[in-house]
Amino acid sequence: MPIEVRLKILLAERKKTARELAEYVGITPSNLSLLSSGKVNGIRFNTLQAICEFLDCQPGDLLVNIHKPEKHKENQE
């Protein structure tokens, strides 16, 4: 997956638990686990906002694009 979810890292840096975050955001711990493992196809903006509020971070701190674009080859005819 080209988008890395850094939720576990941010929780550890802030000495917070996933259970505390789940309660604050209002989602189940199992859904939070799926999110942190990158096994979801999307996230609602209100959920993302609540996570960022709890962790005092920006969306870009939480979601990182790790895809490395291939260099485009020009026609060499």
Image (cartoon, rainbow, N blue to C red):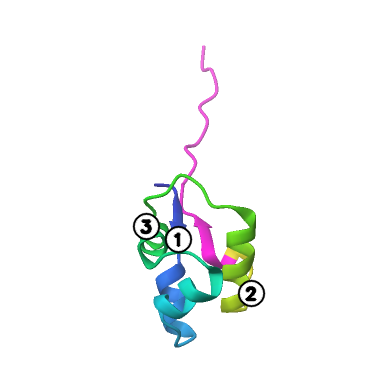
Return the residue nearer the eye: 70 or 73. 70
Return the residue nearer the eye: 24 or 73. 24
Q: Dot 3 corresponds to which residue?
A: 34
Residue 39 x/y as whole percent = 37, 51
Q: Dot 1 corresponds to which residue?
A: 5
Q: Which residues, given as a range, are shown in magenta?
A: 61-77
Q: Amino acid at mark 3?
A: Leu
Of badges 2 and 1, the one in the foreground is 2
Residue at horizontal 51 percent and vertical 17 percent from the top: 76
> Mark 2 and mark 3: span between their CA atoms?
20 Å
Q: Is residue 11 left or right of residue 33?
A: right
Of badges 3 and 1, the one in the foreground is 3
Secondary structure at badge 1 equals strand
Q: Dot 2 corresponds to which residue?
A: 53
Q: Is residue 18 magenta?
A: no
User: Disc 2, disc 3: CB below 8 Å?
Assistant: no
Residue 40 x/y as whole percent = 42, 49
Residue 19, located in which quarter of the rendered image?
Answer: bottom left
In the image, is residue 39 above or below residue 36? above
Residue 63 x/y as whole percent = 52, 59
Secondary structure at badge 3 equals helix
Q: Badge 2 local density, few (<14 within 10 Å), some, or many (20+)?
A: few
Return the residue nearer the eye: 76 or 10. 10
In the image, is residue 19 above or below residue 63? below
Residue at horizontal 40 percent and vertical 62 percent from the top: 36
